[in-house]
């Protein structure tokens, strides 16, 4: 699913009207109808609902939805239309005219003075002051800022239409969150906004739900976007079926530099996930003392002993492998960093760096310039900031990731709730490549070893011959889906990294067979 900025969304609306031979008011009614039924599905007719509408098209949707609810028996409605800077948009004016024809409707048009209605935690507020069509980020000021704070402090359940007022659909860095509406639920018109995928805005947006408004699919396909949401239909065509006459070497060999004394669990989880996700062979190179642990826990994997008893000191490639993985549990000793530097100078195979490999590089930053093209790195927030400098927000971190992916020609898997797979460039030669946000996963995956499992899943697809950008995208999605399946079985609190690993095969089967997927959002 593509994620568009406001100007592209307006193009899509115009194209929808032209293709379906409707005018903007008919599309407005369709949108309002979807909003109306979503609210009605959540609240009974006796619920007190206060509608705060602005003068634009977002306000028009709220007015029309309120009219429809009133006609369906929702009579405890109070509607305020803020028209402090006339004129109203054409559609908002038309929606207002229809609304005021209703007998008994509680409607107030605010032009100057405004006394806000009493609000409590028993009330529902529909926020439609401003939508995603605003061209530039802006703070709500003056009376609007005071109204926003009043609503936020009231404890009322807030439903924002399209975006919470004061939040821009794309960039909000430096904006005061206190002057934005803090929604409990955001009803999004057809397509998500970039700002929804950034942790900075989570408390502003609350839960969000896409409303399918049947926008013109041809126009959506024709428009390019730098940001995408990965779904099952994105991953399914990439998964190649296994041939009946095939052997383990047809599915690749992964060499995994992982583990040290006290950290062999990381090697175990990574190796097991690599095999679960379909690699034909997995070899773990680790400290000598790790052999019994590894070969007992993952007997399917081979073990290559380092000359040191306790940690890795040698990363020489003795054989050809289809993927090389470095990092889980290796520590950051000087000899390990030396071994990593030697590997980077000599590795010509697809490479994935995670965990302590990234911490090693942060101790010796010159190693960044040695990364082979299309190397995959999988940092969490702390590892990312150690590598590329402290970032003040998730938005800054994403922009920095895009810059660093371009500079070093690498693929950055920036882990989080909506893990972002940041590609270095695209065939068109644009300044930056695309960013793919993952739609699967859940808070139960915030558990020790989950990152090692992710590394193994991506490694398996690298070993099977998928391009690095494909392996990263597929691996992140399947890892998250396996976590969702594990959460269904064990609950988010009770699941472990091993549970995620055990569900990898079932996650892949679910995608291939078009099974019913858990709701990712």
Image: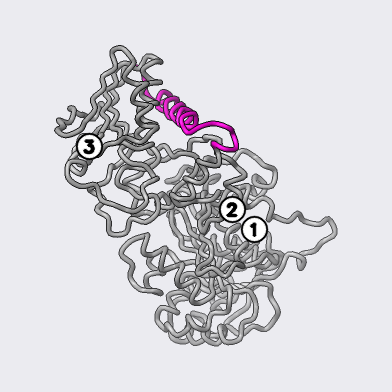
Name the residue carrying label 3: 84
Which span of residues is magenta-colored? 17-45
Q: Earlier in the sequence, mark 3 or mark 1?
A: 3
- The residue carrying pointer 2 sits among few (fewer than 14), some (14 to 19) or many (20 or more) residues within 10 Å by Cα, namely many
Name the residue carrying label 1: 277
**Front residue of 59 and 42:** 59
Secondary structure under the numbered disc 1 in the rendered image = loop
Q: Residues at badges 2 and 1 in contact (C-beta under 8 Å)?
A: yes
Secondary structure under the numbered disc 2 in the rendered image = helix
Q: Percent from the top left, x then y, of residue 218?
A: 62, 44
Residue ID at (55%, 44%): 485
Q: In the figure, residue 51 lies in which quadrant?
A: top left
Disc assigned to residue 145: none
Image color mode: one colour
Name the residue carrying label 2: 478
Q: Nearest to the eye among marks 2 and 1: give it.
A: 2
Q: Which of marks 3 and 2 is nearer the N terminus?
A: 3
Calculate the distance from the C-alpha at mark 2 to the C-alpha at mark 1: 9 Å
Magenta-highlighted stretch: main secondary structure? helix
Calculate the distance from the C-alpha at mark 3 to the C-alpha at mark 1: 59 Å
- The residue carrying pointer 1 sits among few (fewer than 14), some (14 to 19) or many (20 or more) residues within 10 Å by Cα, namely many
Q: Is residue 225 left or right of residue 400?
A: right
Q: Does the magenta stretch include residue 34?
A: yes
Q: Nearest to the eye among marks 3 and 1: give it.
A: 3
């Amino acid at each position: 699913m593509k994620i568009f900025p406001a100007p592209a969304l307006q193009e899509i609306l115009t194209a929808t009207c032209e293709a379906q031979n409707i005018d903007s008011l008919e599309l407005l009614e369709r949108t309002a109808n979807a909003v109306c039924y979503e609210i009605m599905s959540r609240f009974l007719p006796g619920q007190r609902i206060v509608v705060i509408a602005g003068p634009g098209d977002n306000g028009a949707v709220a007015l029309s939805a309120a009219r429809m609810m009133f006609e369906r028996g929702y009579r405890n409605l109070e509607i305020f239309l803020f028209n402090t800077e006339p004129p109203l948009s054409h559609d908002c004016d038309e929606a207002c005219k229809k609304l005021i024809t209703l007998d008994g409707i509680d409607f107030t048009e605010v032009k100057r003075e405004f006394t806000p209605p009493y609000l409590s935690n028993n009330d529902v507020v529909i926020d439609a002051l401003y939508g995603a069509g605003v061209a530039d980020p802006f703070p709500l000021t003056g009376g609007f800022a005071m109204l926003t704070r009043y609503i936020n402090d009231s404890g009322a359940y807030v439903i924002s239409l399209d975006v919470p007022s004061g939040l821009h659909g794309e960039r909000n860095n430096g904006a005061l969150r206190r002057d934005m509406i803090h929604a409990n639920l955001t009803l999004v018109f057809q397509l998500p906004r970039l700002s929804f995928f950034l942790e900075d805005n989570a408390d502003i947006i609350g839960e969000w739900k896409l409303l399918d408004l049947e926008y013109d699919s041809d126009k959506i396909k024709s428009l390019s976007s730098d940001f995408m949401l990965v779904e099952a239909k994105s991953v399914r065509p990439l998964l190649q079926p296994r041939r009946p006459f095939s052997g383990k070497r047809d599915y690749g060999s992964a060499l995994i530099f992982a583990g040290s004394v006290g950290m062999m669990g990381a090697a175990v989880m990574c190796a097991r996930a690599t095999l679960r996700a379909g690699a034909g062979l997995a070899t773990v190179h680790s400290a000598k003392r790790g052999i019994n642990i590894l070969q007992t826990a993952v007997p399917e994997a081979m073990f290559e002993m380092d000359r040191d008893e306790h940690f890795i000191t040698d990363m020489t490639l003795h054989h050809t492998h289809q993927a090389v993985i470095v990092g889980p549990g290796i520590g950051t000793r000087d000899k390990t960093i030396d071994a990593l530097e030697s590997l980077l100078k000599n590795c010509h195979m697809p490479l994935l760096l995670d965990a302590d490999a990234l911490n090693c590089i942060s101790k010796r930053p010159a190693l960044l310039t040695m990364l082979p093209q299309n190397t995959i790195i999988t940092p969490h927030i702390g590892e990312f900031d150690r590598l590329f400098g402290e970032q003040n927000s998730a938005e800054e971190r994403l922009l920095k990731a895009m810059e660093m992916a371009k500079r070093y020609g690498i693929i950055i898997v920036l882990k989080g709730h909506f893990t972002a797979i940041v590609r270095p460039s695209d065939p068109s030669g644009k300044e930056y490549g695309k960013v793919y946000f993952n739609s699967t996963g859940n808070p139960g995956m915030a558990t020790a070893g989950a990152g090692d499992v992710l590394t193994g899943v991506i490694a398996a697809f690298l070993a099977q011959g998928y391009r690095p950008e494909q392996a990263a995208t597929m691996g992140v999605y399947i890892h998250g889906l396996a976590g969702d399946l594990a959460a269904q079985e064990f609950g988010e609190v009770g699941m472990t990294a091993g549970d995620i690993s055990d569900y990898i095969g079932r996650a892949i089967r679910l995608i291939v067979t078009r099974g019913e997927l858990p709701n990712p959002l």
